Amino acid sequence: MARSKNYQDMLIESLKDPKEALAYLNSILEECHDCDEEESQKLLLLALNNIAQAQGGIAKLSKKSGLGRESLYKTLSPKGNPKLTTLTNVIHAMGFDLKFCMPTKR
């Protein structure tokens, strides 16, 4: 009998598709509307870490972003507290842009 994949493996596999990764990030940001600041930051950093894993890992992201590998491990950890410049650098290295838009009515 074949073993089933665990959720994390399936998530990482799906995040290899840039459109899936973008949808994932947007859903995390929507979910963060109902969270406190600390929880929102943890969720976003976890999402970015998952996308980094899907795109080849932290070492590859380090090369693309020009940021140190060990620094990225710390930055994208649940206790990470990145500067805006670091965060935007990571987001751009992943192939995304950071934009602002008007909120949709709830």
Image (cartoon, rainbow, N blue to C red):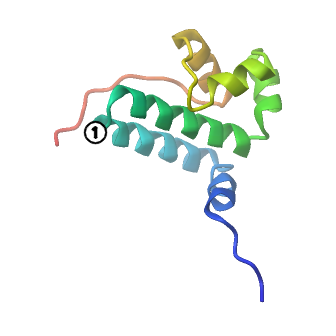
Left or right position of 75 against 37? right
Q: Position of residue 40 (x, y in %)?
A: 41, 32
The C terminus sits in image quarter: top left
At label 1, the amino acid type is Asp
Q: Position of residue 16 (x, y in %)?
A: 69, 49
Left or right position of 36 against 75? left
Res 81 → quadrant: top right
Left or right position of 33 against 26? left
Please say if 20 is above or below 80: below
User: Which residue is pictured at 40% across the width and 37% down the height?
Assistant: 29
Per the image, the residue denoted by label 1 is 34
Camera-nearest residue between 85 and 6? 6
| Extreme residue toward the left, this view | 106
Left or right position of 92 against 73? left
Camera-nearest residue between 38 and 105? 38
Res 86 → quadrant: top right
The N terminus sits in image quarter: bottom right
| Extreme residue toward the bottom, this view | 1
**Number of residues whose C-alpha sits closer than 10 Å to that of mark 1, classed few (under 14), some (14–19) or many (20 or more):** few
